[in-house]
Amino acid sequence: MDTKTICFLLFSFICLNEARVISISPQPGLLVTQGGEDPDPEVNQKREFVKQMMKDAWDDYVRYAWGENELKPISQTGQDGGIYGDSKIGATIIDSLDTLFIMGFYEEYIKGRNWVAENFDFKTVNTSVSVFETNIRILGGFLTAYALTRDDLYLDQANAVGQLLLPAFDTPSGFPYNRINPATGVGSGSSTSMADLGTLHLEFEYLSEITANPIYVDKVNKIRQNLWDLEKPNGLYPNTVNVQTGRFSDSHVSMGGGADSFYEYLLKSWIQTQDQQARQMYDEAMDAFVANDLVRVSKQSHLLYIGELSGARIDDVGSHLECFAGGMFALGSVTDPKSPADGNRDRDMEIGQNFTNTCHESYIRSDSHIGPEVFRFTDTAEAVAVNDNEKDWAWDAAQSIEKYSKAGPGRGYSGLRNVYSSAPVQDDVQQTFFLAETLKYLYLVFSTDDLIDLDKWVFNTECHPLPVKGKNPMF
Protein backbone atom coordinates (compact mmCIF):
# COMPACT_ATOMS: atom_id res chain seq x y z
CA MET A 1 0.00 0.00 0.00
CA ASP A 2 1.11 3.61 -0.36
CA THR A 3 1.45 5.77 2.72
CA LYS A 4 -1.42 8.09 1.75
CA THR A 5 -3.91 5.63 3.17
CA ILE A 6 -2.47 5.93 6.67
CA CYS A 7 -3.43 9.60 6.91
CA PHE A 8 -7.16 8.88 6.64
CA LEU A 9 -7.11 6.72 9.76
CA LEU A 10 -5.00 9.30 11.60
CA PHE A 11 -7.53 11.99 10.66
CA SER A 12 -10.12 9.86 12.42
CA PHE A 13 -7.94 9.69 15.54
CA ILE A 14 -7.74 13.49 15.59
CA CYS A 15 -11.50 14.00 15.31
CA LEU A 16 -12.38 11.29 17.82
CA ASN A 17 -10.01 12.87 20.33
CA GLU A 18 -11.74 16.22 19.61
CA ALA A 19 -8.37 17.96 19.29
CA ARG A 20 -8.36 21.70 19.83
CA VAL A 21 -5.63 24.15 18.88
CA ILE A 22 -4.89 27.87 19.23
CA SER A 23 -4.18 29.83 16.10
CA ILE A 24 -0.53 30.14 15.16
CA SER A 25 0.79 33.68 15.06
CA PRO A 26 0.50 35.13 11.55
CA GLN A 27 3.48 37.47 11.81
CA PRO A 28 6.17 36.44 9.29
CA GLY A 29 8.87 36.88 11.92
CA LEU A 30 7.40 34.31 14.31
CA LEU A 31 8.17 31.19 12.34
CA VAL A 32 8.79 28.76 15.18
CA THR A 33 5.50 27.59 16.62
CA GLN A 34 5.12 27.12 20.33
CA GLY A 35 2.95 24.84 22.42
CA GLY A 36 1.64 21.37 21.96
CA GLU A 37 3.98 19.65 24.41
CA ASP A 38 2.03 17.12 26.43
CA PRO A 39 2.54 17.19 30.22
CA ASP A 40 2.78 13.41 30.08
CA PRO A 41 6.47 12.71 29.34
CA GLU A 42 5.64 9.46 27.55
CA VAL A 43 3.22 11.17 25.15
CA ASN A 44 5.68 14.00 24.55
CA GLN A 45 8.42 11.48 23.81
CA LYS A 46 6.22 9.96 21.10
CA ARG A 47 5.61 13.44 19.71
CA GLU A 48 9.35 14.01 19.46
CA PHE A 49 9.73 10.63 17.79
CA VAL A 50 7.30 11.69 15.05
CA LYS A 51 9.11 15.01 14.72
CA GLN A 52 12.35 13.12 14.12
CA MET A 53 10.59 11.06 11.45
CA MET A 54 9.76 14.32 9.68
CA LYS A 55 13.35 15.50 10.04
CA ASP A 56 14.68 12.27 8.53
CA ALA A 57 12.18 12.32 5.65
CA TRP A 58 12.93 15.96 4.85
CA ASP A 59 16.71 15.69 5.19
CA ASP A 60 16.83 12.67 2.89
CA TYR A 61 14.78 14.56 0.30
CA VAL A 62 17.11 17.56 0.57
CA ARG A 63 20.16 15.33 0.31
CA TYR A 64 19.17 13.33 -2.76
CA ALA A 65 16.20 14.99 -4.51
CA TRP A 66 16.19 18.72 -3.77
CA GLY A 67 13.88 20.59 -6.15
CA GLU A 68 12.45 17.42 -7.66
CA ASN A 69 8.93 16.29 -6.94
CA GLU A 70 9.57 13.26 -4.78
CA LEU A 71 12.38 11.20 -3.31
CA LYS A 72 13.30 7.63 -4.20
CA PRO A 73 14.90 6.81 -0.84
CA ILE A 74 16.32 3.41 -1.76
CA SER A 75 17.76 4.59 -5.08
CA GLN A 76 18.85 7.85 -3.44
CA THR A 77 17.61 9.99 -6.31
CA GLY A 78 14.67 12.13 -7.32
CA GLN A 79 11.33 10.92 -8.68
CA ASP A 80 9.88 13.11 -11.41
CA GLY A 81 7.78 10.59 -13.28
CA GLY A 82 4.75 10.86 -11.02
CA ILE A 83 1.64 13.02 -11.26
CA TYR A 84 3.57 16.02 -12.63
CA GLY A 85 5.51 14.09 -15.24
CA ASP A 86 9.02 15.37 -15.89
CA SER A 87 8.29 18.86 -14.57
CA LYS A 88 10.41 19.63 -11.52
CA ILE A 89 8.12 21.81 -9.41
CA GLY A 90 9.38 20.80 -5.97
CA ALA A 91 6.09 19.17 -5.00
CA THR A 92 7.53 17.77 -1.76
CA ILE A 93 8.74 21.24 -0.77
CA ILE A 94 5.35 22.88 -1.28
CA ASP A 95 3.42 20.06 0.38
CA SER A 96 5.78 20.15 3.39
CA LEU A 97 5.96 23.89 4.13
CA ASP A 98 3.21 23.98 6.74
CA THR A 99 4.34 20.75 8.41
CA LEU A 100 7.82 22.22 8.84
CA PHE A 101 6.28 25.43 10.17
CA ILE A 102 3.93 23.71 12.61
CA MET A 103 6.70 21.45 13.94
CA GLY A 104 8.99 24.44 14.42
CA PHE A 105 11.68 23.53 11.88
CA TYR A 106 12.80 27.12 11.24
CA GLU A 107 15.83 26.58 9.00
CA GLU A 108 14.14 23.87 6.95
CA TYR A 109 11.07 26.04 6.41
CA ILE A 110 13.18 29.00 5.23
CA LYS A 111 15.08 26.76 2.82
CA GLY A 112 11.80 25.60 1.31
CA ARG A 113 10.42 29.13 1.16
CA ASN A 114 13.51 30.36 -0.66
CA TRP A 115 13.29 27.56 -3.21
CA VAL A 116 9.71 28.56 -4.00
CA ALA A 117 10.72 32.21 -4.39
CA GLU A 118 13.58 31.40 -6.74
CA ASN A 119 12.33 28.42 -8.73
CA PHE A 120 8.61 27.70 -8.71
CA ASP A 121 6.72 28.51 -11.91
CA PHE A 122 3.68 26.35 -12.57
CA LYS A 123 3.06 27.67 -16.07
CA THR A 124 6.22 25.89 -17.24
CA VAL A 125 4.48 22.54 -16.65
CA ASN A 126 3.73 21.39 -20.19
CA THR A 127 1.94 18.13 -19.46
CA SER A 128 -1.54 17.09 -18.41
CA VAL A 129 -1.86 17.19 -14.61
CA SER A 130 -4.62 16.33 -12.18
CA VAL A 131 -6.74 19.32 -11.20
CA PHE A 132 -7.62 17.54 -7.96
CA GLU A 133 -4.01 16.82 -6.93
CA THR A 134 -2.81 20.28 -7.93
CA ASN A 135 -5.58 21.88 -5.93
CA ILE A 136 -5.11 19.94 -2.70
CA ARG A 137 -1.29 19.78 -2.73
CA ILE A 138 0.05 22.85 -4.53
CA LEU A 139 -2.73 25.41 -4.18
CA GLY A 140 -3.63 24.11 -0.74
CA GLY A 141 0.00 24.20 0.36
CA PHE A 142 0.43 27.81 -0.71
CA LEU A 143 -2.87 28.91 0.84
CA THR A 144 -1.98 27.45 4.21
CA ALA A 145 1.53 28.85 4.10
CA TYR A 146 -0.01 32.27 3.46
CA ALA A 147 -2.56 31.88 6.25
CA LEU A 148 0.17 30.94 8.72
CA THR A 149 2.69 33.63 7.75
CA ARG A 150 0.96 36.37 5.72
CA ASP A 151 3.93 36.14 3.36
CA ASP A 152 2.78 37.64 0.05
CA LEU A 153 4.99 35.20 -1.84
CA TYR A 154 2.44 32.49 -1.13
CA LEU A 155 -0.51 34.71 -2.00
CA ASP A 156 1.01 35.48 -5.39
CA GLN A 157 1.84 31.84 -6.07
CA ALA A 158 -1.61 30.66 -5.00
CA ASN A 159 -3.26 33.18 -7.30
CA ALA A 160 -0.99 32.16 -10.19
CA VAL A 161 -1.82 28.48 -9.74
CA GLY A 162 -5.52 29.27 -9.40
CA GLN A 163 -5.50 31.21 -12.65
CA LEU A 164 -3.86 28.28 -14.44
CA LEU A 165 -6.58 25.92 -13.17
CA LEU A 166 -9.49 28.07 -14.38
CA PRO A 167 -9.51 26.78 -18.00
CA ALA A 168 -10.45 23.37 -16.61
CA PHE A 169 -13.91 24.81 -15.94
CA ASP A 170 -14.53 25.66 -19.59
CA THR A 171 -16.98 22.80 -20.16
CA PRO A 172 -20.63 22.78 -21.28
CA SER A 173 -21.79 21.70 -17.82
CA GLY A 174 -19.53 23.79 -15.63
CA PHE A 175 -18.17 20.61 -14.09
CA PRO A 176 -14.39 20.86 -14.57
CA TYR A 177 -12.19 18.60 -16.62
CA ASN A 178 -10.20 16.40 -14.27
CA ARG A 179 -6.92 17.24 -16.03
CA ILE A 180 -5.34 20.44 -17.31
CA ASN A 181 -2.15 21.37 -19.13
CA PRO A 182 -0.97 24.51 -17.29
CA ALA A 183 1.24 25.65 -20.18
CA THR A 184 -1.45 25.42 -22.87
CA GLY A 185 -4.64 25.78 -20.83
CA VAL A 186 -6.14 22.70 -22.48
CA GLY A 187 -8.37 20.53 -20.31
CA SER A 188 -9.07 16.84 -20.84
CA GLY A 189 -11.20 13.99 -19.54
CA SER A 190 -14.81 13.46 -20.64
CA SER A 191 -15.80 11.99 -17.28
CA THR A 192 -14.74 13.02 -13.81
CA SER A 193 -15.18 11.56 -10.36
CA MET A 194 -17.20 13.09 -7.54
CA ALA A 195 -13.95 13.50 -5.61
CA ASP A 196 -12.31 15.34 -8.50
CA LEU A 197 -15.11 17.86 -8.96
CA GLY A 198 -16.16 18.05 -5.32
CA THR A 199 -12.77 18.67 -3.69
CA LEU A 200 -12.18 22.26 -4.72
CA HIS A 201 -14.48 24.33 -2.57
CA LEU A 202 -12.34 24.99 0.51
CA GLU A 203 -9.35 26.20 -1.48
CA PHE A 204 -11.28 28.24 -4.06
CA GLU A 205 -13.44 29.87 -1.38
CA TYR A 206 -10.38 31.06 0.54
CA LEU A 207 -8.52 32.06 -2.63
CA SER A 208 -11.39 34.35 -3.62
CA GLU A 209 -11.33 35.88 -0.15
CA ILE A 210 -7.62 36.72 -0.07
CA THR A 211 -7.46 37.89 -3.71
CA ALA A 212 -10.78 39.77 -3.61
CA ASN A 213 -11.61 37.97 -6.86
CA PRO A 214 -14.97 36.16 -6.89
CA ILE A 215 -14.17 34.12 -9.98
CA TYR A 216 -12.83 31.20 -7.96
CA VAL A 217 -15.76 30.81 -5.59
CA ASP A 218 -18.20 31.41 -8.45
CA LYS A 219 -16.76 28.39 -10.26
CA VAL A 220 -17.16 26.03 -7.32
CA ASN A 221 -20.56 27.43 -6.37
CA LYS A 222 -21.76 26.48 -9.84
CA ILE A 223 -20.53 22.94 -9.24
CA ARG A 224 -22.42 22.85 -5.94
CA GLN A 225 -25.63 24.16 -7.50
CA ASN A 226 -25.42 21.73 -10.41
CA LEU A 227 -25.07 18.83 -7.99
CA TRP A 228 -27.96 20.15 -5.94
CA ASP A 229 -30.16 20.19 -9.05
CA LEU A 230 -29.20 16.70 -10.26
CA GLU A 231 -31.63 13.85 -9.70
CA LYS A 232 -29.94 11.45 -7.31
CA PRO A 233 -31.03 7.79 -7.34
CA ASN A 234 -32.36 6.97 -3.87
CA GLY A 235 -30.61 10.10 -2.61
CA LEU A 236 -27.18 8.69 -3.51
CA TYR A 237 -24.40 10.23 -5.59
CA PRO A 238 -22.92 7.82 -8.16
CA ASN A 239 -19.14 8.16 -8.35
CA THR A 240 -18.77 9.50 -11.91
CA VAL A 241 -20.14 12.49 -13.84
CA ASN A 242 -19.90 13.32 -17.55
CA VAL A 243 -18.50 16.85 -17.85
CA GLN A 244 -20.17 17.37 -21.22
CA THR A 245 -23.74 16.44 -20.25
CA GLY A 246 -23.50 17.20 -16.55
CA ARG A 247 -25.16 13.86 -15.75
CA PHE A 248 -24.07 10.87 -13.72
CA SER A 249 -22.33 8.40 -16.00
CA ASP A 250 -22.37 5.23 -13.89
CA SER A 251 -24.30 3.63 -11.03
CA HIS A 252 -21.41 2.78 -8.71
CA VAL A 253 -21.68 4.38 -5.26
CA SER A 254 -19.02 4.30 -2.55
CA MET A 255 -17.33 6.39 0.10
CA GLY A 256 -13.89 5.29 -1.06
CA GLY A 257 -11.65 6.33 -3.92
CA GLY A 258 -13.36 8.54 -6.47
CA ALA A 259 -15.92 9.81 -3.97
CA ASP A 260 -14.36 10.16 -0.52
CA SER A 261 -13.35 13.81 -0.26
CA PHE A 262 -16.53 15.01 -2.00
CA TYR A 263 -18.44 14.16 1.18
CA GLU A 264 -15.63 15.49 3.35
CA TYR A 265 -15.77 18.86 1.60
CA LEU A 266 -19.55 19.17 1.93
CA LEU A 267 -19.14 18.99 5.69
CA LYS A 268 -16.04 21.15 5.81
CA SER A 269 -17.60 23.84 3.62
CA TRP A 270 -20.22 24.17 6.33
CA ILE A 271 -17.48 24.45 8.94
CA GLN A 272 -15.44 26.92 6.87
CA THR A 273 -18.21 29.38 5.92
CA GLN A 274 -21.47 28.09 7.42
CA ASP A 275 -22.61 27.09 3.92
CA GLN A 276 -26.17 25.94 4.62
CA GLN A 277 -26.59 24.23 1.25
CA ALA A 278 -23.42 22.20 1.77
CA ARG A 279 -24.55 21.08 5.23
CA GLN A 280 -27.94 19.99 3.92
CA MET A 281 -26.33 18.06 1.07
CA TYR A 282 -23.97 16.38 3.53
CA ASP A 283 -26.73 15.41 5.96
CA GLU A 284 -28.93 14.07 3.18
CA ALA A 285 -26.05 12.08 1.69
CA MET A 286 -25.20 10.45 5.03
CA ASP A 287 -28.88 9.67 5.61
CA ALA A 288 -28.98 8.04 2.17
CA PHE A 289 -25.99 5.82 2.96
CA VAL A 290 -27.77 4.62 6.10
CA ALA A 291 -31.20 4.27 4.46
CA ASN A 292 -29.78 2.23 1.57
CA ASP A 293 -28.09 -0.22 3.95
CA LEU A 294 -24.57 0.82 2.97
CA VAL A 295 -23.55 1.36 6.59
CA ARG A 296 -23.34 -2.28 7.62
CA VAL A 297 -22.22 -4.53 10.46
CA SER A 298 -20.31 -7.75 9.79
CA LYS A 299 -21.90 -11.02 10.86
CA GLN A 300 -18.97 -12.63 12.63
CA SER A 301 -17.42 -9.87 14.73
CA HIS A 302 -19.99 -7.09 14.48
CA LEU A 303 -17.55 -4.68 12.87
CA LEU A 304 -19.12 -1.64 11.24
CA TYR A 305 -18.11 -0.94 7.65
CA ILE A 306 -19.34 1.02 4.64
CA GLY A 307 -20.24 -1.10 1.65
CA GLU A 308 -20.23 -0.18 -2.03
CA LEU A 309 -23.22 -0.23 -4.36
CA SER A 310 -22.77 -1.63 -7.86
CA GLY A 311 -26.10 -1.38 -9.63
CA ALA A 312 -28.48 -3.19 -7.28
CA ARG A 313 -25.74 -5.26 -5.59
CA ILE A 314 -24.03 -4.26 -2.35
CA ASP A 315 -20.38 -5.30 -2.25
CA ASP A 316 -19.11 -6.08 1.24
CA VAL A 317 -15.68 -4.58 0.70
CA GLY A 318 -13.85 -1.96 2.72
CA SER A 319 -11.38 0.49 1.21
CA HIS A 320 -8.64 2.08 3.27
CA LEU A 321 -9.44 5.35 1.54
CA GLU A 322 -12.79 5.19 3.35
CA CYS A 323 -11.10 5.27 6.74
CA PHE A 324 -11.26 9.07 6.81
CA ALA A 325 -15.03 8.62 7.23
CA GLY A 326 -14.70 7.70 10.89
CA GLY A 327 -13.40 11.17 11.60
CA MET A 328 -15.89 12.73 9.19
CA PHE A 329 -18.90 11.18 10.91
CA ALA A 330 -17.55 12.28 14.30
CA LEU A 331 -16.88 15.80 13.04
CA GLY A 332 -20.35 15.92 11.53
CA SER A 333 -21.78 14.90 14.88
CA VAL A 334 -20.04 17.55 16.99
CA THR A 335 -20.84 20.31 14.48
CA ASP A 336 -24.47 19.31 13.85
CA PRO A 337 -26.51 22.56 14.01
CA LYS A 338 -29.74 20.69 14.70
CA SER A 339 -31.00 19.93 18.16
CA PRO A 340 -30.21 16.45 19.51
CA ALA A 341 -33.86 15.53 19.02
CA ASP A 342 -33.93 16.61 15.37
CA GLY A 343 -30.43 15.68 14.25
CA ASN A 344 -28.29 12.56 14.11
CA ARG A 345 -25.51 13.42 16.55
CA ASP A 346 -25.60 10.17 18.48
CA ARG A 347 -25.96 8.03 15.36
CA ASP A 348 -23.09 9.71 13.55
CA MET A 349 -20.75 9.66 16.55
CA GLU A 350 -21.43 5.95 17.01
CA ILE A 351 -20.75 5.31 13.32
CA GLY A 352 -17.55 7.34 13.52
CA GLN A 353 -16.22 5.52 16.55
CA ASN A 354 -17.13 2.05 15.34
CA PHE A 355 -15.85 2.55 11.81
CA THR A 356 -12.54 3.90 13.08
CA ASN A 357 -12.24 0.79 15.21
CA THR A 358 -12.83 -1.34 12.11
CA CYS A 359 -10.05 0.46 10.26
CA HIS A 360 -7.75 -0.11 13.20
CA GLU A 361 -8.58 -3.81 12.96
CA SER A 362 -7.39 -3.77 9.35
CA TYR A 363 -4.03 -2.58 10.67
CA ILE A 364 -3.44 -5.05 13.46
CA ARG A 365 -4.53 -8.02 11.34
CA SER A 366 -1.62 -7.48 8.93
CA ASP A 367 1.88 -8.78 9.63
CA SER A 368 3.31 -5.29 9.29
CA HIS A 369 0.58 -3.61 11.39
CA ILE A 370 0.00 -1.25 8.46
CA GLY A 371 -3.43 -1.31 6.88
CA PRO A 372 -4.08 -2.73 3.40
CA GLU A 373 -5.68 -0.81 0.54
CA VAL A 374 -8.73 -3.11 0.48
CA PHE A 375 -10.27 -5.49 3.02
CA ARG A 376 -13.30 -7.74 2.65
CA PHE A 377 -15.92 -9.01 5.06
CA THR A 378 -16.96 -12.64 4.72
CA ASP A 379 -19.00 -15.05 6.81
CA THR A 380 -15.92 -16.97 7.94
CA ALA A 381 -12.93 -14.66 8.36
CA GLU A 382 -13.10 -11.54 10.48
CA ALA A 383 -11.09 -9.88 13.19
CA VAL A 384 -12.17 -9.57 16.81
CA ALA A 385 -12.85 -5.96 17.76
CA VAL A 386 -10.77 -4.45 20.54
CA ASN A 387 -11.65 -1.24 22.35
CA ASP A 388 -8.36 0.60 22.67
CA ASN A 389 -7.01 4.12 22.97
CA GLU A 390 -6.66 5.99 19.68
CA LYS A 391 -3.26 7.34 20.70
CA ASP A 392 -2.07 3.79 21.20
CA TRP A 393 -3.32 2.93 17.72
CA ALA A 394 -1.46 5.88 16.24
CA TRP A 395 1.72 4.98 18.10
CA ASP A 396 1.54 1.42 16.83
CA ALA A 397 1.17 2.79 13.28
CA ALA A 398 4.13 5.14 13.75
CA GLN A 399 6.36 2.33 14.99
CA SER A 400 5.28 0.09 12.13
CA ILE A 401 6.06 2.79 9.58
CA GLU A 402 9.47 3.29 11.16
CA LYS A 403 10.17 -0.44 11.17
CA TYR A 404 8.97 -1.41 7.71
CA SER A 405 8.87 1.74 5.56
CA LYS A 406 12.16 3.40 6.45
CA ALA A 407 14.97 2.98 3.92
CA GLY A 408 17.60 2.95 6.67
CA PRO A 409 18.82 4.87 9.74
CA GLY A 410 18.33 8.60 9.22
CA ARG A 411 16.80 7.93 5.81
CA GLY A 412 13.46 8.53 4.09
CA TYR A 413 10.37 6.34 3.85
CA SER A 414 8.73 4.21 1.15
CA GLY A 415 5.32 2.68 0.59
CA LEU A 416 4.94 -1.09 0.97
CA ARG A 417 3.93 -3.52 -1.75
CA ASN A 418 2.40 -6.14 0.57
CA VAL A 419 1.47 -5.26 4.15
CA TYR A 420 0.66 -8.90 4.91
CA SER A 421 4.31 -9.88 4.56
CA SER A 422 6.55 -9.97 7.63
CA ALA A 423 9.32 -8.61 5.38
CA PRO A 424 7.42 -6.33 2.99
CA VAL A 425 9.10 -4.98 -0.13
CA GLN A 426 9.35 -1.19 -0.29
CA ASP A 427 8.21 0.63 -3.44
CA ASP A 428 11.06 3.19 -3.35
CA VAL A 429 8.88 6.31 -3.45
CA GLN A 430 8.50 8.83 -0.61
CA GLN A 431 5.19 10.42 -1.52
CA THR A 432 4.68 14.12 -0.81
CA PHE A 433 1.61 13.38 1.28
CA PHE A 434 3.70 11.35 3.72
CA LEU A 435 5.21 14.63 4.92
CA ALA A 436 2.08 16.73 4.38
CA GLU A 437 -0.47 14.39 5.93
CA THR A 438 0.74 11.24 7.64
CA LEU A 439 3.44 12.85 9.78
CA LYS A 440 1.42 16.00 10.48
CA TYR A 441 -1.58 14.02 11.69
CA LEU A 442 0.63 11.77 13.78
CA TYR A 443 2.27 14.84 15.30
CA LEU A 444 -1.11 16.35 16.15
CA VAL A 445 -2.31 13.10 17.74
CA PHE A 446 0.51 13.44 20.29
CA SER A 447 0.14 17.21 20.73
CA THR A 448 -2.10 18.98 23.21
CA ASP A 449 -4.98 21.30 22.48
CA ASP A 450 -2.85 24.44 22.22
CA LEU A 451 -1.35 23.81 18.80
CA ILE A 452 -4.08 24.13 16.12
CA ASP A 453 -7.59 25.22 17.13
CA LEU A 454 -10.19 23.25 15.19
CA ASP A 455 -12.69 26.00 15.91
CA LYS A 456 -10.49 28.33 13.85
CA TRP A 457 -8.95 26.02 11.25
CA VAL A 458 -10.32 23.32 8.96
CA PHE A 459 -8.05 20.82 7.21
CA ASN A 460 -8.23 20.30 3.48
CA THR A 461 -7.96 16.71 2.31
CA GLU A 462 -4.15 17.01 2.07
CA CYS A 463 -4.01 18.08 5.76
CA HIS A 464 -3.36 21.75 4.96
CA PRO A 465 -5.24 23.82 7.59
CA LEU A 466 -7.32 26.70 6.19
CA PRO A 467 -8.92 29.49 8.25
CA VAL A 468 -12.56 29.35 9.34
CA LYS A 469 -14.53 32.43 8.36
CA GLY A 470 -15.63 34.62 11.26
CA LYS A 471 -13.51 32.75 13.80
CA ASN A 472 -10.01 33.16 12.40
CA PRO A 473 -8.60 36.63 11.64
CA MET A 474 -6.91 35.14 8.57
CA PHE A 475 -10.36 34.86 6.91
Image (cartoon, rainbow, N blue to C red):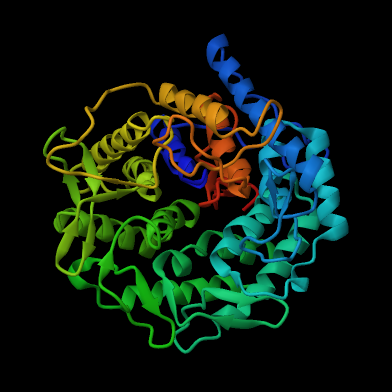
Residue 288 location, quadrant: bottom left
Q: In this picture, is 464 found above or below 279?
A: above
Residue 214 location, quadrant: bottom right
Q: In this picture, is 446 found above or below 217?
A: above
Give 399 or 7, whichever is nearer the viewer. 399
Q: x, y (%) of residue 394?
A: 46, 28
Extreme residue toward the top, this view: 41
Residue at x 73%, y 78% (from the top left corner): 183
Residue 345 location, quadrant: top left
Extreme residue toward the right, this view: 118
Q: x, y (%) of residue 409?
A: 69, 25
Q: Horizontally, is 309 left or right of 37 in the view? A: left
Residue 40 visible: no
Residue at x 18%, y 53% (from the top left corner): 290
How many numbered marks have been drawn onto this rendered protein structure?
A: 0
Q: x, y (%) of residue 64?
A: 79, 44
Q: Horizontally, is 286 left or right of 93 in the view? A: left
Residue at x 50%, y 71% (from the top left corner): 220
Q: In this picture, is 241 found above or below 51?
A: below
Residue 435 visible: yes
Q: Horizontally, is 422 left or right of 132 in the view? A: left
Q: x, y (%) of residue 430?
A: 63, 45
Q: In this picture, is 81 found above or below 49?
A: below
